[in-house]
Image: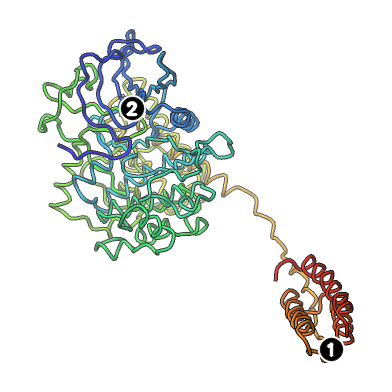
């Protein structure tokens, strides 16, 4: 049995027979069963009675209902719907039961959290870790572009959604404490305390300062350290860890494990910089750095070989589940239970053939093609054989070049409408890329990625072609950006005019002052005060002659003090000093 999980983690539970919500209707969905519970709420599996669509419904526990917690659910729903990215858990609806308990309706997932995976495997090899990080940062970048900062990024909030015959789909969950930038309705505790998980909080978040996208990148660095070393960079109780995040330099990956590529070592260290401005400029920049390191995992192994709890056949993918199947994992802004079987295959592969990070870092335009066809959605360095160009190619020739001719790949099938659409799109992209290849893809990276998708399309099913189209969207967008950048007019040369040198201020010179009488206590106090005011004048003016009028006044008062013989005369001098001191501190408030 898995150990108990902290925060809002879902524990496996059987539905009580008397649960009044089982069988009830919430909006368009009917609750079918209770699948789990946590500290914040109870999770149910629900079904649309007409179309059979399944969803997860999270209902907050009655004892946890408060304006703050209800706002947390609402912030999560708003944040997720502002992002609209396949790597973000989708939330369909938000409402309140008759007894006042709020609930959210979201997609139903199966798989496991990254935290559960790390408990099983301790740490990941470089290629797999870089691939997971790349998928996470893609979703994170979409959130930042939508003006949303997650603020609680950690392995428990990264979910590995199992897919038939494909690598898992990475989902970011739990936007319950997300900050919607440029908005005043973001969640905040009434007592002003800090929200987040100490092990992954950025220094500025711990200090209670402004939290922006850089805070998520810091958490990403801590998470990367954990994935690659099996431990977190700072150990201790919550207070010790928070102090360490603020004050201590993080260790290098290479100081904990061997075989870390220098590029990855430097990237993770930069992500954990104390100053937000010293971290990478954006999630997109981090993703570009990871692309040459990522190695996508293989598809899931058969679930028949593993023991898992029973689930209704209505929610199992057709044709793959029979008898005992994988557990349903309902994600409600938390990491849920489940089994990601493909990781077992990856672990065995890593033991039999340890990863060689130095080879994964190389980005070559024409590397040797893999034995197995690569996964559909990838951002690795290009693979596939590309022949050397025989000579200059005119635009007219480029318009007639087909993918099969330009890559020596077999023609794509075109028997169905779906196949024809795929063939036409790939042909069009090849034509557009080859026409501008020397301008925007001299290194061959885009061409290699396009070859990968071509190979995948050669034997793809209808559902796989959908994923290929998504990958082609990324390639098409990047190609358009490169062309626009190349064709943009050169930026005007800025003429930098050095600012005029500020005038030099002469040093403060105080003329010789008369000797003050100190025959009694009153005279001694006046003499001491005058000496202190001379020092204060030098301190506040930084020993510069920036207030000659005040200097003259002080010399004059000093002369009057030397002449004073009675208590009344000395009182007049002190009153003049009071006025002079007030003028000095008003003009020079900082000593």
Q: Which residue is disc 2 drawn over?
A: 41
Q: Secondary structure at mark 1?
A: loop
Which residue is label 1 attached to?
A: 511
Q: Which mark, residue 120?
A: none
Where 318 falls versus 5 (above or below)? above
Q: Tell which of 57 and 502 is nearer to you.
A: 57
In the picture provided, is 520 more to the left or to the right than 476?
A: right
The reply to whether residue 300 is in sight is: yes
In which quadrant of the rendered view does residue 301 lie? Answer: top left
- Residue sticking out furthest to the top: 50
Residue lying at 43% horizontally and 30% vertically, measured from the top left: 69
- How far is mark 2 from mark 1, CA to CA? 79 Å
Give 495 or 252, whichever is nearer the viewer.
252
Residue closer to the observer: 461 or 218: 218
Horizontally, is 583 left or right of 96 in the view?
Answer: right
Provide residue 440's location: percent of width, then percent of height: 50, 49
Q: Residue at x 60, y 47 (%)?
A: 487
Residue 55 rendering spot, x and y as whole percentages: 33, 20
Residue 261 pos. (x, y %): 31, 61
Q: Residues within 10 Å of mark 1 (few under 14, many from 20)?
A: few
Q: How many marks?
A: 2
Tell me which corner region of the image, top left, top right, bottom left or bottom right, holds residue 27: top left
Q: Is residue 188 above or below residue 366?
A: above
Q: Secondary structure at mark 2?
A: strand
Quarter of the figure with the N terminus: top left
Residue visible at 23% across and 13% down in the picture: 18
Relative horizontal placement of residue 345, taking residue 106 as reference (left or right):
left
Query: Does residue 140 appear left or right of residue 462 in this picture?
Result: right
């Amino acid at each position: 049995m898995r150990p108990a999980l902290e925060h809002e983690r879902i524990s496996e539970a059987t539905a009580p027979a008397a649960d009044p919500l089982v069988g009830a209707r919430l909006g368009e969905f009917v609750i079918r069963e209770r699948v789990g519970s946590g500290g914040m709420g109870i999770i149910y599996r629900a079904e649309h009675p007409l179309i059979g669509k399944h969803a997860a419904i999270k209902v907050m526990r009655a004892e946890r209902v408060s304006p703050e917690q209800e706002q947390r659910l609402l912030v999560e729903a708003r944040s997720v719907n502002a992002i609209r990215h396949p790597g973000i858990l989708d939330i369909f609806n938000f409402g309140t039961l008759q007894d006042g308990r709020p609930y959210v309706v979201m997609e139903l997932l199966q798989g496991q959290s990254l935290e559960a995976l790390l408990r099983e495997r301790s740490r990941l090899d470089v290629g797999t870790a870089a691939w997971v990080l790349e998928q996470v940062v893609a979703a994170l970048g979409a959130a930042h572009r939508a003006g949303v900062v997650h603020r609680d990024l950690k392995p428990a909030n990264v979910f590995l959604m199992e897919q038939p015959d494909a690598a898992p789909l990475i989902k970011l969950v739990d936007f319950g404490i997300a900050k919607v930038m440029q908005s005043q309705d973001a969640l905040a505790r009434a007592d002003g305390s800090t929200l987040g998980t100490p092990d992954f909080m950025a220094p500025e978040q711990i200090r209670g300062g402004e939290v922006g996208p850089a805070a998520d990148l810091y958490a990403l660095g801590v998470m990367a350290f954990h994935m690659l070393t099996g431990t977190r960079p700072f150990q201790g109780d919550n207070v010790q860890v928070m102090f360490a995040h603020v004050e201590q330099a993080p260790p290098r990956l290479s100081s904990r494990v061997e075989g870390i590529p220098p590029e990855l070592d430097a990237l993770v260290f930069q992500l954990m910089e104390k100053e937000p401005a010293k971290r990478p400029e954006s999630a997109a920049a981090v993703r570009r750095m990871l692309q040459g390191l990522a190695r996508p995992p293989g598809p899931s192994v058969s679930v028949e070989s593993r023991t898992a709890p029973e689930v209704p056949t209505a929610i199992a993918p057709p044709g793959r589940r029979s008898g005992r199947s994988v557990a349903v994992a309902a994600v409600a802004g938390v990491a849920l239970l489940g089994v990601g079987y493909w990781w077992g295959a990856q672990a065995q592969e890593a033991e039999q053939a340890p990863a060689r990070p130095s080879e994964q870092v190389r980005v070559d335009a024409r590397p040797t093609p893999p034995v197995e066809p690569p996964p559909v959605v990838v951002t690795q360095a290009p693979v596939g054989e590309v022949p050397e160009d025989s000579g200059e190619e005119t635009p007219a020739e480029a318009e007639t070049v087909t993918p099969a001719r330009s890559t020596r790949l077999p023609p794509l099938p075109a028997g169905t409408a779906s196949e024809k659409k795929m063939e036409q799109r790939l042909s069009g992209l090849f034509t557009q890329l080859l026409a501008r290849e020397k301008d925007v893809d001299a290194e061959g990276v885009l061409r290699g990625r396009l070859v990968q998708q071509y190979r995948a399309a050669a034997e793809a099913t209808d559902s796989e072609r959908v994923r290929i189209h998504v990958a082609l969207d990324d390639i098409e967008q990047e190609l358009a950006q490169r062309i626009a950048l190349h064709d943009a007019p050169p930026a005007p040369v800025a003429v930098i005019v050095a600012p005029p040198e500020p005038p030099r201020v002469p040093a403060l010179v105080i003329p010789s002052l008369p000797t003050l009488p100190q025959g009694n206590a009153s005279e001694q106090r006046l003499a001491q005060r005058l000496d202190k005011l001379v020092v204060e004048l030098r301190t506040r003016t930084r020993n510069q002659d920036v207030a000659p009028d005040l200097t003259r006044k002080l010399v004059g008062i000093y002369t009057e003090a030397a002449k004073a013989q009675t208590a009344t005369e000395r009182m007049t001098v002190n009153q003049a000093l009071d006025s002079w001191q007030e003028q000095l501190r008003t003009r020079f408030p900082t000593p």
